Image (cartoon, helix red, strand yellow):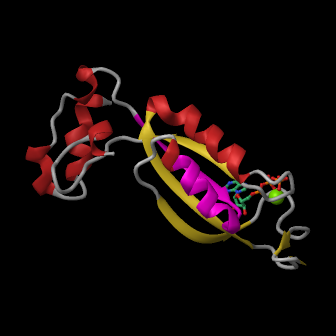
Amino acid sequence: MGQDRSAAISCSCGAYRALVPLSGHSQGNRDVKLIIATIKPFKLEEVREALTAVGVRGMMVTEIKGFGAQSGHTEIYRGAEYAVAFVPKVKLEIVVPDVLVDQVTATIARTARTDKIGDGKIFVLDVEAALRVRTGETDEDAL
Ligand SMILES: Nc1ncnc2c1ncn2[C@@H]1O[C@H](COP(=O)(O)OP(=O)(O)OP(=O)(O)O)[C@@H](O)[C@H]1O
Ligand SMILES: [Mg+2]
């Protein structure tokens, strides 16, 4: 996987090929992971503060609609039972060093929890490569 890092990044912009070292994995474990989490919208600020406190330095936030096991039918949103299949949620996308994954997922789970249905889900994915555009730093250094 490590040898293909510059190739992966040059797919989106060939000009970066020269900036991206091929040696990411030879410098130790520099794996980064993507955490995708859905949470209830009113929990966003609390979750953001808690994540900042454990060292998260960036995230993407998107307002989405979705459904889980109840297909949206029995979920309460802003005091009313939501009668349609999609319920408003906030999606977080957070790229973190491998070593932070457990702490970040635990923090989201603890902070977003209300003990009612629809509290959200957390998924963890591998990230092939990361690049800070301004400096050319890669992987963990790019976060
Ligand atoms: N399998 C899935 N794949 C992708 N997104 C999902 C999946 N399940 C849930 N989501 C997203 O997470 C949001 C919240 O899901 P939710 O917490 O209702 O899951 P659940 O399995 O129904 O759990 P609960 O029984 O606690 O409600 C959904 O609105 C949807 O956006
Ligand atoms: Mg649900």
Q: Residue at x 53, y 35 (%)?
A: 101
The magenta stretch is 32-51
Q: Quadrant of residue 4?
A: top left
Nearer-the-camera pick, 48 or 22 = 48
Quadrant of the displayed image that contains ligand 2: bottom right
Is 18 one of the magenta-colored residues? no
The answer to whether 85 is drawn above or below residue 115 in the figure is below
> Does the segment drawn in magenta span residue 33?
yes
Count every numbered label the image shows and give the total: 0
- The location of residue 29, given as percent across then percent down, is 35, 23
The spot of residue 118 in percent (x, y) is: 80, 59
Image location of residue 67, percent across then percent down: 76, 64
Residue visible at 57% across and 34% down in the picture = 103
Q: Where on the picture, by quarter, is residue 59?
A: bottom left
Quadrant containing the C terminus in the rendered view: top left
Splitting the image into 4 quarters, where does residue 11 fall? bottom left
Residue at far left of view: 18
Q: Residue placed at 77% from the left, 56% from the top? A: 119
Left or right: residue 80 compared with residue 56 = right
> In the visual, does 129 lie left or right of 121?
left
User: Which residue corresponds to the image point at 32% horizontal and 37% vertical from the top-left?
Assistant: 140
Looking at the figure, which quarter contains the N terminus? top left
Relative horizontal placement of residue 75, taking residue 140 as reference (left or right): right
Location of residue 109 in the rendering, given as x and y in whole percent from the top left corner:
69, 45
